[in-house]
Amino acid sequence: MVGLLQNPRLRGFSLASLDLPTSLAIAVGVVVASLGVITGLWPYLIFLAVLIPLGLTVVKRPQTGILIFAALIPFDGLHYVVPIPVWAEGWKEAFVLGLVIATFLCPSDARGARGRRVPGWVPAVAALFAIAVVTVPMVGMGTALVGLRISYFNILIAVVVWRCPLNRDDRDQLINIFIGVAIISSIYGIYQQFVGHAQLAAWGYPYNEVIRFANGWRLRSFSTFNQPFPFAFYLMLTVLIALPRAIADPKRLRNRIFLFSLPLIGVAIVFAYVRGAWLGLGIGLLYLAFHRYKILVAFIPLAFAALLFMPGGSSFTSAALQSNSLNVRTTSWADRGGAVWSNPIGDGIGTTGAAAAKVATTAAPTALGVNTFQADNAYLKVGLEIGVAGLWLFVSLLVSAFLTGRYVEKRVEEEDKHFAAGWSAQVLGIMGACFVASYFEMIPMDALFWLMLAVVSTMSPRMRGVSESELAPVVRAGPTNEVEKVSEESYGPASEWQRATP
């Protein structure tokens, strides 16, 4: 919100400054909303009242839709307490498909550049998807479609960002969104500790699915998410992405707010009791400390001191350091790990994890429980489903994502280096967390991974090229052979290339 108010494009805003299509869209939205209240069909008409202006805005500039999507998806878990129509439950997929369509309808100056270098991670993703498709006959079309949707649908977000890259202002707004959502969700997550599980259940949150407990019946905060796990990993993402920018420019108000909110975010991530997020955050912070931000090294002794002085025997310590779940997981991994090598082609896409549970629940909706294997290990899940080749490609994808961040960091301006460094730290954290969590099955972490990967990939000069709107020659009066330099802020995503003007 702070960043939004500081945006110079909003200063002096008035309704008279709106163009005709936008004004008509707002007018139609107001009329439709009023009719909805009068006729009693408000759920449908309110939906249209929001959809029409939103659709026109996104078609005009899909980058705005990307930011809106990033701001909304962390609140998807509120559907348990805020009733929504059944037909609106698939809003995330519909939104992404709408963004894809918008990239073909938007003006040329909103699209990316021609002749850009394809990122190095694209072949790994294409090969992963191809192997998954090959396994479709092994599991049947129904199971395969569920597995493909859960594992690969959100790659379309990367396609959207690649076609319509975010500029520097957009990336700054994205960090604003991460910080704002992290603060709001942290407050709500801590509030859940005071409210208690009984009240949360009375509000509509289901036990075992959303309401979960750590050892000693310690409630695991889940905030606005559908489980504690994505809540903790989202806070991990925010810290690793926003902290480099805050350290580099501590005088900016947005960064000051973030730095002062770190204790709040830290308490929230602790009360989620997701040790995979703690592990990933620790790995990412260590990378930042020894890679670029030496000031973080001073906090390493403080972290170890905090661990040493944790009260022994308390329910909090028991919940934070419980070994029972880890022992169960390692036993399960040992039992199932051999299957990856004994069946190197895998069992087929959608046979484990969230996809298998979804298929089983659909087949027997009245069953009290479903007996499906939950790997709680992204590497094991991929190996079991699409075999050794798929596992190798998955690891290659993560390594390539990390190297993309390093590559971009060396080739962009100082302000963007911090964004790329934060991404590299996040990828290392994800690689560590994948040993103890099925990271890419979590909403919204899977979607945000592809979003961030594409954003970083489009920052490098070699991946920007020349935008379609810039292909027309620039005409100046008088004979001159000057070389004009175009900046990103004035000409969109394709920046800092030189062209000879006649």
Image (cartoon, grey):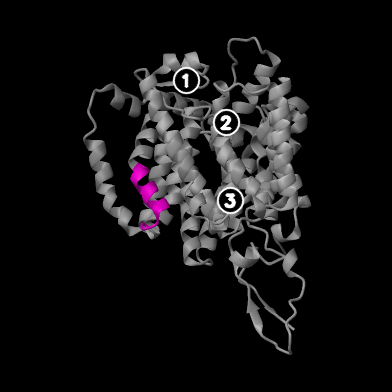
In the rendered image, the vertical position of residue 16 relative to residue 305, given as above or below: below
For the residue carrying disc 1, how many other residues have a C-alpha within 10 Å: few (<14), some (14-19), or many (20+)? many
Image: magenta residue range: 250-262
Which badge, 2 or 3, is on the more N-terminal residue? Answer: 2
How far apart in space, not on screen, are marks 2 and 3 (Cα)?
22 Å
Residue occupying the far front of the picture: 16
For the residue carrying disc 3, how many other residues have a C-alpha within 10 Å: few (<14), some (14-19), or many (20+)? many
In the rendered image, the vertical position of residue 330 relative to residue 467, given as above or below: above
For residue 254: magenta? yes
- Provide the residue designation for mark 2: 76
- Provide the residue designation for mark 3: 453
Q: 99 or 214, which lies in front?
A: 99
Mark 3 is on which residue type? Leu
The answer, for residue 349, to whether it is visible in the render is no
* Residue 340 x, y percent position in the rendering: 59, 34
* Residue 148 x, y percent position in the rendering: 70, 34
- Provide the residue designation for mark 1: 211
- Mark 2 or mark 3, whichever is nearer to me: 2
Q: 391 or 288, which lies in front?
A: 288
